[in-house]
Image (cartoon, rainbow, N blue to C red):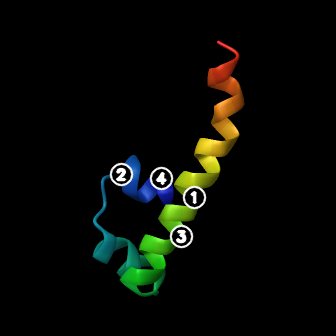
Amino acid sequence: MILMKEIEGMEYHEIAETLGCSIGTVMSRLFYARKKLQHLLRDVYENV
């Protein structure tokens, strides 16, 4: 889903339609995906 938004540039409603879920679900999942990526990448960038 995060690739659909950030790489492919799809809008929330397009992702929701493609995946068959609500826009709210898309927004929530993207929020938590970004938060998890931030946490995972924090160690990489702190050690540079």
Quadrant of residue 26 in the image?
Answer: bottom left
Amino acid type at mark 3: Arg
Mark 1 crowdedness (10 Å alpha carbons): few <14, some 14-19, many ≥20: some
Q: CA separation, marks 4 and 3?
A: 12 Å
Q: CA separation, marks 1 and 3?
A: 6 Å
Element on which disc 4 rests: helix
Q: Earlier in the sequence, mark 4 or mark 1?
A: 4
Q: In this view, does 43 lie above or below 31?
A: above
Quadrant of residue 39 in the image?
Answer: top right
Q: Which of marks 4 and 3 is nearer the N terminus?
A: 4
Quick check: marks 1 and 3 in contact, CB under 8 Å? yes
Residue for badge 4: 3
Amino acid type at mark 2: Glu
Element on which disc 1 rests: helix
Residue for badge 1: 33
Residue for badge 3: 29
Q: CA separation, marks 1 and 2?
A: 16 Å
Q: CA separation, marks 4 and 2?
A: 6 Å
Mark 2 crowdedness (10 Å alpha carbons): few <14, some 14-19, many ≥20: few
Residue 41, given in percent of the width and then of the height, sits at 64, 35
Quick check: marks 4 and 2 in contact, CB under 8 Å? yes
Residue 8's tag is: 2
Q: Is residue 14 left or right of residue 44?
A: left
Q: Which residue is drawn at 46% across and 86% down?
A: 21
